[in-house]
Amino acid sequence: MLSLFFILSGVSMKKIDLDEYDIDINDESFGYDDKDVVEVEVNTSKAANIGFEWGHCIISAIVIVVILLTFVFRLVNIDGSSMLPTLTNSDKVIITNFFYEPEVGDIVVIPAGKYHDEPIIKRIIALEGQDVYINYETHEVYVDGVLLNEDYIKCPTINSIGEKELSLTVPEGKAFILGDNRGDSYDSRYFGAFNDGSAEDLGESKCIDVKDIIGKAQFVVFPFEHFGYLY
């Protein structure tokens, strides 16, 4: 007869009779079965998978931003004071050109070369088929006979080369543009010929081609104190 002895701290030894408990230590069921052991596989590539997923997200985000900035949005820097008080020097402006159709009142960007040595940003005053009349003595601007209420301009509409008035018809596919700072803006008043031609001829020489417009200014994004929608 087999017996097991347990020594307990501070307790006298006690003899346990295994037969009393009907335990056979030679039985295969005594103890544990290898089948009961759960094997745990450590996934050493988990960190690598997480890194790959994050990398994929970052690359996708960069591609989307590049596409948006190329085909939908552009960031331009304002250089000069011709659009005061609406835009100030060094303002950062978001412009859009995706499916853009010019409208009167839009602030638009025109590339360098054709009209000026540098890119320019101006406001559309009139579009094709509209008649523009400016009285430089009274500083009034009329479109189709209606006096414009230009609460966005910095100073009265003048002409620095001594002309008293301007009268023209905007040709097809063109736009008449002015800066909001009428005292310091190179715009349709000074493009092309002097004001000694017909309304149609002046329209051809003083108006810009709509197809030359890069895009419409939408938001000032920097500096933060100027942040906001432009309309």
Image (cartoon, rainbow, N blue to C red):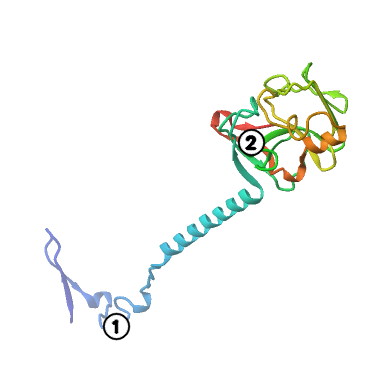
> Residue, x 62% and y 53% (percent of image)?
67
Q: Is residue 123 above or below residue 71?
A: above
> Residue, x 44% and y 60% (percent of image)?
51
- Which mark is drawn over residue 27? 1
The one nearer the camera, 156 or 192, is 192
Of the residues under marks 1 and 2, which one precedes in the sequence? 1
* Residue under pointer 2: 219
**Residue 89 falls left or right of residue 54:** right
- Which mark is drawn over residue 204? none
> Residue, x 27% and y 74% (percent of image)?
21
| Residue type, label 1 | Asp
Residue sitting farthest toward the top: 138
Image quadrant for the N terminus?
A: bottom left
Instruction: Give the quadrant of residue 73.
Output: top right
The one nearer the camera, 168 or 16, is 168
Instruction: Give the quadrant of residue 119.
Output: top right
Q: CA distance from mark 1 to mark 2?
A: 84 Å
Label 1 crowd bin: few (<14), some (14–19), many (20+), radius 10 Å? few
Q: Position of residue 63 (x, y in %)?
A: 57, 55
> Which structural element holds mark 1?
loop
**Residue 222 falls left or right of residue 83:** left
Q: Position of residue 229 (x, y in %)?
A: 65, 33
> Residue, x 13% and y 60% (percent of image)?
9
| Residue type, label 2 | Phe
> Which structural element holds mark 2?
strand
Q: Is residue 186 above or below residue 115?
A: above
Instruction: Give the quadrant of residue 216.
Output: top right
Q: Position of residue 207 (x, y in %)?
A: 78, 36
**Residue 50 falls left or right of residue 171:** left
